[in-house]
């Protein structure tokens, strides 16, 4: 078996740029979250009114996520990242100004811009990250998402420190906007043009595909062969049964991660009677566990394959959630959050990577975009719905939904096994598929 292809300078800059900007987006998100109480005080609004202000973030995020895949197919990933970065920076600046001027509508509008930028950039980054994986023949997306998690830890710590010294929230967010601008400029320069657009153009340039090549719909395990242009092409990728199962897995894993982000501090305060400070520290513990799992997951994926790793991850997360729900000890529940975070850490990036694996290059971006959109929808929209259920059964009991979804995901992880390319015979891709291992350098062309 050949060694993985060596990384040339351009690919190294490409990967480093993605890592840097994901770190910057994590810092920016956590900086906003950490200063939310200060913004509420500056606006002098009630908790209910602040909820309406926060709705701007949800609106912007979902709008960005839903249009990002189509924009990548039209203009390429680099252009969409540039647009997302610009909106993100503009949103931070508007939020900072709205908070300084005590204008609720300004903060709402800033959050909408910020969320739209995040949604656009996140989907484009997943498409770029999957392309880097195909180039290198080894996992990249777990570390890419790990950079975002690391950024949230850094941003949260900085936010807590600046809050303690009563540093003005407007100046804090303005400084973050400057840092994100610098990271964005360097990233856009380092990312190659046309990652998603070139794939769509390749499909358009070969309309006379041979019969049986899968040019109309996805077939079999390869899952490729869907035409990727237009709304019809975006929906066509879901004709592949394997992709549907992958989508269900990402829904469950993203829901588990988003539920912790939205409810964990309140779950500890209301469900286990801890202080607000302890609740915040518990969430910090979850973020650290997520970061650790994503940075440490690469070697596990290479050795055991995505199917086995995600199955184990879902079960570990389920154990953690179960202990948080059913344990009568606040200390044990707090410690179990580590299992929740470690288990949820790899679900999103690994399923996104699996979505594009085995497909023709011209179809991979459409499949990655589809699964990314499903995951972010579950992450952003699903967890808030637990609040309605909690009104009737309590927040701890509402988390049983997360537990059930994790159990269901563990049962269908076979879909993450590597598909068998038709050109490969026994002993190559077929063996990798049976074991559910990710592609290695032996399946990829050398770069040098």
Image (cartoon, helix red, strand yellow):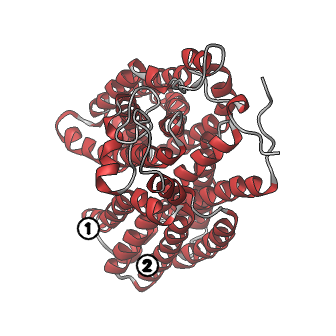
Which corner quadrant of the image does residue 94 belong to?
Answer: bottom left
Residue 270 in sight from this viewpoint = no
Residue position for label 1: 49
**Image location of residue 12, percent across then percent down:** 76, 53
* Residue 416: mark: none
Toward the viewer: 251 or 134?
A: 134
Residue under the image location 55 percent in, 14 percent down: 434
Q: Is residue 88 above or below residue 66?
A: below
Residue 62 as seen in the image, left or right of residue 342: left
Q: Which mark is residue 99?
A: 2
Where disc 2 sits, the SS reads helix
The front one of 298 and 433 is 433
Q: CA distance from mark 1 to mark 2?
A: 15 Å
Q: Nearer the viewer, residue 318 or 67?
A: 67
Specify the quadrant that holds the N terminus.
top right
Residue 446 percent coordinates (x, y):
77, 40
Q: Left of 2 or right of it: where is 307? A: left
Residue 327: percent from left, percent from top: 40, 22
Q: Residue at x 37, y 61 (%)?
A: 67
**Left/right of residue 199 with respect to residue 24 in the rendered view:** left
Residue 175 in the image: above or below residue 383 = below
Image quadrant for the C terminus?
top right
Q: Position of residue 101 (x, y in %)?
A: 42, 86
Q: Residue furthest left?
A: 392
């Amino acid at each position: 078996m050949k060694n993985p292809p060596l990384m040339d300078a351009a690919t190294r800059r490409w990967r480093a740029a993605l890592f840097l900007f994901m770190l910057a987006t994590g810092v920016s998100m956590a900086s906003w979250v950490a200063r939310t109480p200060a913004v509420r005080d500056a606006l002098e609004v009630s908790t209910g009114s602040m909820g309406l202000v926060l709705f701007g973030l949800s609106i912007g995020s979902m709008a960005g996520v839903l249009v990002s895949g189509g924009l990548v197919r039209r203009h390429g990933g680099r252009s969409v990242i540039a647009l997302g970065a610009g909106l993100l920076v503009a949103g931070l600046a508007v939020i900072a100004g709205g908070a300084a001027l005590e204008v609720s509508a300004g903060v709402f509008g800033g959050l909408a811009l910020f969320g739209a930028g995040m949604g656009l950039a996140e989907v484009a980054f997943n498409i770029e990250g999957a392309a880097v994986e195909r180039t290198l023949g080894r996992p990249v997306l777990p570390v890419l998402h790990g950079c975002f998690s690391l950024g949230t830890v850094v941003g949260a710590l900085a936010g807590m420190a600046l809050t303690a010294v009563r540093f003005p929230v407007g100046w804090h967010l303005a400084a973050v906007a400057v840092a994100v601008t610098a990271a964005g400029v360097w990233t856009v320069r380092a990312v190659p043009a046309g990652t998603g657009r070139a794939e769509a153009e390749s499909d358009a340039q070969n309309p006379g595909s041979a019969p049986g090549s899968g040019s109309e719909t996805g077939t079999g395990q390869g899952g490729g062969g869907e035409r990727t242009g237009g709304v019809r092409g975006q929906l066509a990728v879901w004709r592949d049964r394997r992709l549907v199962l992958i989508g269900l897995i990402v829904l469950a894993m993203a829901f588990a991660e988003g539920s912790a982000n939205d409810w964990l501090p309140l779950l500890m305060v209301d469900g286990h009677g801890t202080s607000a400070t302890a609740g915040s520290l518990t969430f910090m513990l979850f973020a650290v566990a997520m970061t650790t799992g994503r940075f440490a997951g690469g070697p596990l994926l290479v050795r055991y394959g995505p199917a086995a790793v995600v199955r184990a991850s879902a079960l570990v997360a389920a154990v953690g959630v179960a202990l948080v729900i059913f344990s009568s000890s606040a200390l044990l529940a707090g410690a179990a959050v580590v299992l929740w975070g470690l288990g949820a850490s790899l679900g999103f990036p690994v399923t996104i990577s699996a979505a594009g694996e085995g497909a023709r290059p011209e179809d991979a971006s459409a499949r990655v975009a589809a699964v990314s959109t499903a995951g972010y929808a579950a992450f952003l929209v699903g967890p808030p719905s637990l609040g309605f259920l909690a009104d009737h059964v309590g927040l701890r009991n509402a988390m049983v939904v997360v537990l059930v979804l994790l159990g269901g995901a563990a049962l269908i992880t076979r879909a993450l096994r590597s598909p068998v390319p038709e050109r490969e015979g026994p002993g190559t891709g077929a063996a990798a598929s049976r074991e559910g291992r990710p592609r290695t350098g032996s399946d990829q062309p050398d770069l040098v």
